[in-house]
Image (cartoon, rainbow, N blue to C red):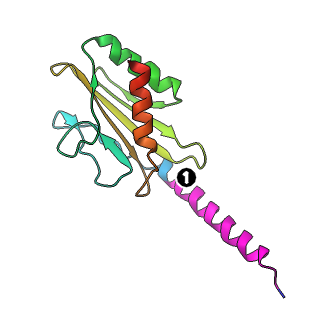
């Protein structure tokens, strides 16, 4: 007679392996869209992303009446182990990895000099929900900048 332990170990191991394969797959994809018509791309309608710009905005932008806040944001991204993909005068794209399984999440920021603010977008590459990790990261970055 088979013990219940073996099937549980196989099931859990298969689940973890499947999640890790998704993490590896997400490494090759990007949820970042860059600047579209002068703005950050619209927010996804799934709960695994946040954005401060556009009709689907669900977070506040970061007030930035001084260029120093833009520079501070770059330092804050580095301090949270973000890996820069693109750094331009008024746009950055960085990638963060989730701690447990290494899923990659894209972070974008656009410095709006006219409105004196920094628009932020953070989105998971795979899945539907992110347990709030993108929103938490954006709020942590805001706290580090202010």
Q: What's the magenta bit mostly, secondary-structure-wise? A: helix
Which residue is at a point 65% across and 67% down the rendered structure image? 14
From the viewer's perspective, is residue 53 above or below residue 9?
Answer: above
Residue linked to disc 1: 24
Which residue is at a point 59% across and 42% down the rendered structure image? 99
- Kindly state the secondary structure of the residue where label 1 is placed: helix
Residue 12, picture quadrant? bottom right
Q: Nearer the viewer, residue 45 or 103?
A: 45
Q: Nearer the viewer, residue 15 or 131?
A: 131
Quadrant containing the N terminus is bottom right
Q: Which residues are magenta?
A: 2-25
The x, y position of residue 143, in whole percent, is 42, 24
From the viewer's perspective, is residue 120 above or below residue 79?
Answer: below
Which residue is at a point 27% across and 42% down the rendered structure image? 58
Q: Residue furthest bottom?
A: 1
On the picture, is 113 further left or further right than 108?
A: left
Quadrant containing the C terminus is top left
Q: Does 24 appear in magenta?
A: yes
Q: Does 6 appear in magenta?
A: yes
The x, y position of residue 54, in whole percent, is 19, 40
Q: Nearer the viewer, residue 64 or 108?
A: 64
On the picture, is 39 further left or further right than 139?
A: left
Residue 94 visible (yes or no) = no
The x, y position of residue 36, in whole percent, is 20, 39
On the picture, is 3 further left or further right than 82?
A: right
The x, y position of residue 40, in whole percent, is 24, 37
Count the marks.
1
Crowding near pointer 1: few (<14 within 10 Å), some, many (20+)?
A: some
From the viewer's perspective, is residue 90 above or below residue 23?
Answer: above
Residue 113 visible (yes or no) = yes
From the viewer's perspective, is residue 102 above or below residue 89?
Answer: below
């Amino acid at each position: 007679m088979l013990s219940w332990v073996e099937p549980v170990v196989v099931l859990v191991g298969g689940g973890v392996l499947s999640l890790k394969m998704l993490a590896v797959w997400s490494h090759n994809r990007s949820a970042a869209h860059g600047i579209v018509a002068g703005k950050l791309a619209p927010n996804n309608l799934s709960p695994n992303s946040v954005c401060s710009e556009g009709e689907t905005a669900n977070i506040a932008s970061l007030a930035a009446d001084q260029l120093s806040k833009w520079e501070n944001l770059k330092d804050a991204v580095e301090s949270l182990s973000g890996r820069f993909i693109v750094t331009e005068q008024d746009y950055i794209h960085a990638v963060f990895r989730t701690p447990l399984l290494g899923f990659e999440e894209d972070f974008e920021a656009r410095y709006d000099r006219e409105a004196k603010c920094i628009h932020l977008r953070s989105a998971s590459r795979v899945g539907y929900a992110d347990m709030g990790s993108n929103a938490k990261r954006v709020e942590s970055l805001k706290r580090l900048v202010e």
